[in-house]
Amino acid sequence: MSFPDFRTRRLGLAAAAAVSALAMVGTAAAQSMVVRSTGPSASKYPTGAKLKASDRLTLVAGDRVVLMQSGKTRTLSGPGTFSATGSVQASQSLGSNVSRMLAKGPSVRSRGGFSRGPDDPMPAELRAPNLWLLDYRQGGTFCVADPATLMLWRPNMEGDTALEIEGGGKKATIAIVAGANFRKWPTDTLPVQYGVDYRLSGAGLRQPVTVRFAAMETVPETVEASVDTLMAKGCTPQLDRLVDTMSEAEGGQG
């Protein structure tokens, strides 16, 4: 075999490998994941389910399924039959809200009160603007980005209030003053412990809220990694917060 023939063959093999790699990437990118599912068919399409490009979803009245594909979401509402994949044009302004939601160093400001149904997304102005802020109105498991800098958050800045925290055999009361809607977790008197139930009361809560912390080896930097981590750790309030923000960024779907 002459040198030119060998070189041509080598380039041909490299091109074939590149095409194959692109095909594999395209297949992976086409896959969708259910990130929220409510309604009569929720058990049929559970949160975390992976769907192939060829899959179709048959929804009935009252169903709402949010799919994530390539870091964006599509919201499907029944009745109807839908493809598992589709194009979404994300809003740039709302997309920046998603970036702020994932940021490791949040800037915090918001105000208001809220009223919503069980399946309705929380309005943006009433939602903690960053995943790693602990909205003390919401119980459940909370994934902690950095125990030393954990911040508590409330949706308004009106009036002084006091939040009582009890857990691990210790108690602490912290004040949140008028003009502020966040306050640092009292790590000096009540260090963050994993696997311990913390009871939060006062500060306008209608009834006590129980929070349990989950550790993370690393803080995820992408939407996909964040969703995977929050699902794996069972940090549902934060997952809902992220999905709500992503859904608002949907600019259109196909």
Image: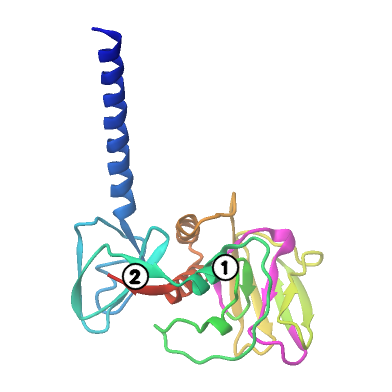
Q: Dot 2: few (<14), some (14–19), or many (≥20) neighbours within 10 Å?
A: many
Secondary structure at badge 2 equals strand
Indicate the quadrant containing the C terminus: top left, top right, bottom left or bottom right.
bottom left
- Residues 211 and 28: in front is 28
Residue topped by disc 2: 74
Secondary structure at badge 1 equals helix
Q: Position of residue 210 (x, y in %)?
A: 59, 75
Residue shown at the point (68%, 58%) measured from the top left: 146
Q: Position of residue 108 (x, y in %)?
A: 68, 75
Q: Is residue 131 left or right of residue 250?
A: right
Look at label 2 and name its amino acid.
Arg
Q: Position of residue 226 (x, y in %)?
A: 50, 59
Residue topped by disc 1: 101
- The stretch in magenta equals 138-162
Q: In the rendered structure, does residue 158 fall within the stretch colored magenta?
A: yes
Considering every residue shown, the one lying at the far front of the view is: 4
Up-down: is 68 above or below 29? Answer: below
Q: Quadrant of residue 135?
A: bottom right
Q: CA distance from mark 1 to mark 2?
A: 19 Å
Q: Quadrant of residue 183?
A: bottom right
Considering every residue shown, the one lying at the far top of the view is: 1
Residue shown at the point (72%, 91%) measured from the top left: 158
Q: Where residue 89 is drawn, which disc sits there? A: none
